[in-house]
Image (cartoon, rainbow, N blue to C red):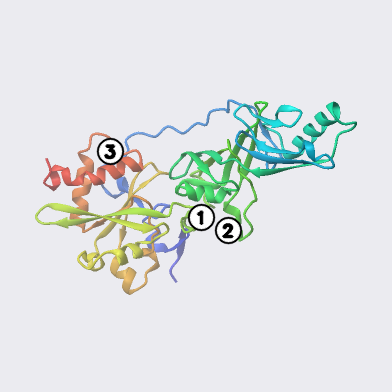
C-alpha cells in the first residue's frame, strides 16, 4: 500500500512526497542548478514597530459614536418645542433650539440624550425631560485598509458595511493573510484608541456565524500576515471563498521555433488547480499531450523560486491526485524540458537575485527580451 503525505491539504503518495519540500515543490538549488541564481542572501526578518498610541481594548466596540456628517433627530417628550433634527457640522456641533450649538462629536446616542436633557433641565425646565435620540442619517464609513489585502488604501463605504464585505470590496485577502487576526483600531475624541481583534477564519472552518461588528468612519482595518511556521491554516480553503482575491494570473511558457518562446496569460478563479489550467487552454496549445511540464513558483516562506514536475496526461486520463496542485497568483507553467533549461540558464545570467513575487513576475515577462530567446 502506498504511503501518503499530506501537503497543504493535498494527499501525495509517499514516493512522490520524498522528492518535494513541505509545499510540494523541490527547491531549485537541490536539483543541480546553481543556487546563486535565485537567492544569495537571507531576507532580514520583518519587525513590527511599537504602536505610537495608547491602545485600549474595549467591550464597547459596537457602540456607535457620532462624528461630523451624522444626522440625528431628538424628540423631547411632553415638550415638542424643544425637539430638533440636524447634522453635526464640521466643528463637531449641532444646533439645538433655545440652547444654541452643543458639541456632541464622539458621543453615543444615549450620551446625547443625557447631555441635552441635562442642559434643558438646568436652563428651562424644573427637571431633565425624557427624550429620544435616533440616528436619522449616518455618515459614510471612511476606512483605512492596511496589511494583507489586494488593494490597501483609503476607502468610503456605505453605512452598515460589514468587515467581510470590506475585505471583498478591496479585492480580497492575499495568500499571505491570516484571517484569524484582523485588527480594528478606532480613535476616540480623548486621544485613546479602541482595538478589537476579529477572527473570520474559524467561523469558515466550523460553519458558524460570522462575528457581528459594526465598522465606523475613522476605523483602521489591518489584515495580519500569516506566520510561515503556522501549519494548521488552510490556505486552499480560503482561496475558494469570497474573502480571497477572486482571480489569479498564471503564465504558460510555450517554445516557438527556432529558439523563442510565447507567453500565455491565464486568468483563473482563485483556488484553481493545475487541471483547471489545462482545461482552460485552447487546443492550439498542446499542453495536454506533454509529459515534460514544470511549475515554477516564488515560495514566500523560503524566499526563493521552487519548481515541481507535473504530468498533464496522468492528470486527465488517470485522475492522478498528485497532479491536483492548487495554483497561486503569478505561478508559471513551463512546457517542455528544453524550454525549462533555457529559463534556468536565463536565471544564471541575471545580476540581481529574485527576492519577491514581483521580481519573479518581472523576470518572466521580460524573458522574450533575453538574448537566449533571440532578444538583445
Q: Which residue is mark 1?
A: 234
Secondary structure under badge 3? helix
Q: Residue at x 78, y 36 (%)?
A: 82
Which residue is more in the foreground, 249 or 90?
Answer: 90
Q: Residue furthest front?
A: 81
Q: What is the distance, in whole Å, between disc 1 and disc 3 at their CAs?
A: 32 Å
Q: Quadrant of the C terminus?
A: top left
Residues at discs 2 and 1 in contact (Cβ within 8 Å):
yes
Q: What is the distance, in whole Å, between disc 3 and disc 2 at their CAs?
A: 41 Å
The x and y percentages for residue 302 are 40, 43
Residues at discs 3 and 2 in contact (Cβ within 8 Å):
no
Which residue is more in the foreground, 234 or 23?
Answer: 234
Compared with residue 42, is residue 176 higher up or lower down, i.e. above or below? below
Q: Is residue 14 left or right of residue 265?
A: right
The x and y percentages for residue 113 are 78, 37
N-terminal label among 2 and 1: 2
Amino acid at each position: 500500500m502506498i504511503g501518503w503525505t499530506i501537503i497543504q491539504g493535498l494527499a501525495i503518495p509517499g514516493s512522490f512526497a520524498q522528492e518535494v519540500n513541505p509545499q510540494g515543490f523541490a527547491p531549485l538549488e537541490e536539483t543541480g542548478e546553481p543556487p546563486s541564481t535565485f537567492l544569495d542572501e537571507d531576507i532580514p526578518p520583518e519587525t513590527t514597530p511599537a504602536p505610537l498610541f495608547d491602545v485600549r481594548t474595549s467591550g464597547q466596540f459596537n457602540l456607535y459614536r457620532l462624528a461630523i456628517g451624522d444626522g440625528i433627530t431628538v424628540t423631547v417628550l411632553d415638550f415638542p418645542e424643544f425637539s430638533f433634527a440636524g447634522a453635526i457640522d464640521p466643528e463637531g456641533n449641532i444646533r439645538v433650539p433655545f440652547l444654541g450649538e452643543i458639541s456632541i462629536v464622539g458621543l453615543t446616542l444615549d450620551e446625547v440624550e443625557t447631555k441635552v436633557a441635562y442642559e434643558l433641565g438646568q436652563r428651562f425646565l424644573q427637571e431633565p425631560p425624557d427624550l429620544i435620540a435616533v440616528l436619522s442619517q449616518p455618515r459614510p464609513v471612511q476606512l483605512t485598509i492596511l496589511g494583507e489585502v489586494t488593494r490597501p488604501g483609503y476607502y468610503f463605504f456605505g453605512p452598515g458595511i460589514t468587515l467581510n464585505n470590506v475585505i471583498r470590496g478591496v479585492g480580497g485577502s492575499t495568500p499571505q493573510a491570516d484571517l484569524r487576526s484582523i485588527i480594528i483600531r478606532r480613535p476616540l475624541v480623548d486621544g485613546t484608541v479602541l482595538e478589537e481583534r476579529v477572527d473570520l477564519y474559524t467561523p469558515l472552518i466550523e460553519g458558524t456565524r460570522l462575528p457581528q461588528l459594526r465598522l465606523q468612519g475613522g476605523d483602521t482595518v489591518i489584515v495580519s500576515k500569516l506566520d510561515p511556521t503556522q501549519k494548521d491554516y488552510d490556505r486552499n480553503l480560503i482561496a475558494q471563498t469570497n474573502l480571497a482575491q477572486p482571480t489569479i494570473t498564471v503564465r504558460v511558457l510555450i517554445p516557438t521555433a527556432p529558439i523563442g518562446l510565447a507567453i500565455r496569460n491565464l486568468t483563473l478563479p482563485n483556488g484553481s488547480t493545475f487541471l483547471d489550467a489545462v482545461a482552460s487552454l485552447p487546443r492550439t496549445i498542446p499542453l495536454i499531450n506533454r509529459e515534460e511540464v514544470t511549475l515554477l513558483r516564488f515560495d514566500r516562506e523560503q524566499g526563493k523560486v521552487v519548481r515541481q514536475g507535473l504530468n498533464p496526461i496522468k492528470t486527465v486520463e488517470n485522475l492522478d491526485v498528485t497532479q491536483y496542485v492548487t495554483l497561486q497568483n503569478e505561478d508559471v507553467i513551463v512546457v517542455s524540458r528544453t524550454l525549462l533549461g533555457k529559463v534556468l540558464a536565463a536565471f544564471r545570467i541575471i545580476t540581481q537575485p529574485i527576492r519577491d513575487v514581483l521580481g519573479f513576475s518581472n523576470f518572466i515577462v521580460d524573458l522574450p527580451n533575453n538574448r537566449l530567446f533571440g532578444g538583445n
